[in-house]
Amino acid sequence: MKRVGALALILVLVASGFVAGAPAGTAAASDLRVNAGGPSYTDGAGNVWSADSGFSGGTTFSNTNNIAGTTDDTLYRTERFGTFTYTFAVPNGAYDVTLRVAETLAGITGAGQRQ
């Protein structure tokens, strides 16, 4: 399987992180943070990210690159790619979901360089 880079795969929930908050419009009772493809981690803001979990399928990849635009490089150095799903049991409701992404494929430095 050819690894095509985190950005394209993150769009289908693959890589540097998945955050599901409390139902929209309420204070967050707890957040679900998963370091996709990676170990548990506490970021610079004190948020705890669990090790990769809740997935079925896919392959993991990691690198040691410095990641521009963040001080939390660890979150963006791992990914899950290929054919996979993530499933989490949460109560019914509306949720805010944030996907954090980084381009980690070697040689990609700008728009239009993917093939």
Image (cartoon, rainbow, N blue to C red):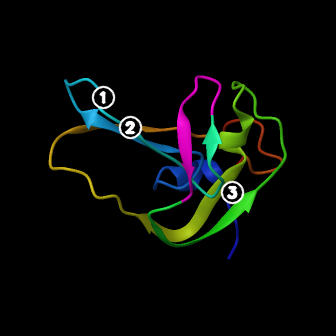
Q: Quadrant of the N terminus?
A: bottom right
Separation of residues labelled 2 and 1 (CA atoms): 7 Å
Q: Which residue is mark 1?
A: 28
Whether residue 29 is in magenta: the answer is no
Q: Earlier in the sequence, mark 2 or mark 3?
A: 2
Judging depth in this view, the residue of 64 and 105 nearest the camera is 64
* CA–CA distance in space, label 1 to label 3: 40 Å
Residue 79: image x %, image y %? 64, 55
How far is the residue under mark 2 from the one under mark 3?
Answer: 36 Å
Q: Which mark is residue 31?
A: 2
Asked whether residue 68 appears in the rendered view, the answer is: yes
Residue 103 visible here = no
The amino acid at mark 3 is Gln
Could you say where residue 51 lies in the image, as x and y percent from the top left?
58, 54
Residue 91 is tagged as none
Foreground: disc 1 or disc 3: 1
Specify the amino acid type for callout 2: Asp
- From the viewer's perspective, tell me whether residue 104 is left or right of residue 35: right
Q: Main secondary structure of the magenta part?
A: loop
Secondary element type, mark 2: loop
Q: Position of residue 56 (x, y in %)?
A: 47, 73
What residue is drawn where x is 27% and y is 35%?
A: 22
Residue at image position (70%, 71%) is 2
The quarter of the picture where residue 88 lies is bottom left
Q: Is residue 7 above or below residue 28?
A: below
For the record, the magenta segment spans 43-52
Residue 11 vs 102, above or below: the answer is below
Amino acid at circle 1: Ala
Q: Residue sitting at 78 percent across and 37 percent down?
A: 109
- The image quadrant where one finds the C terminus is bottom right
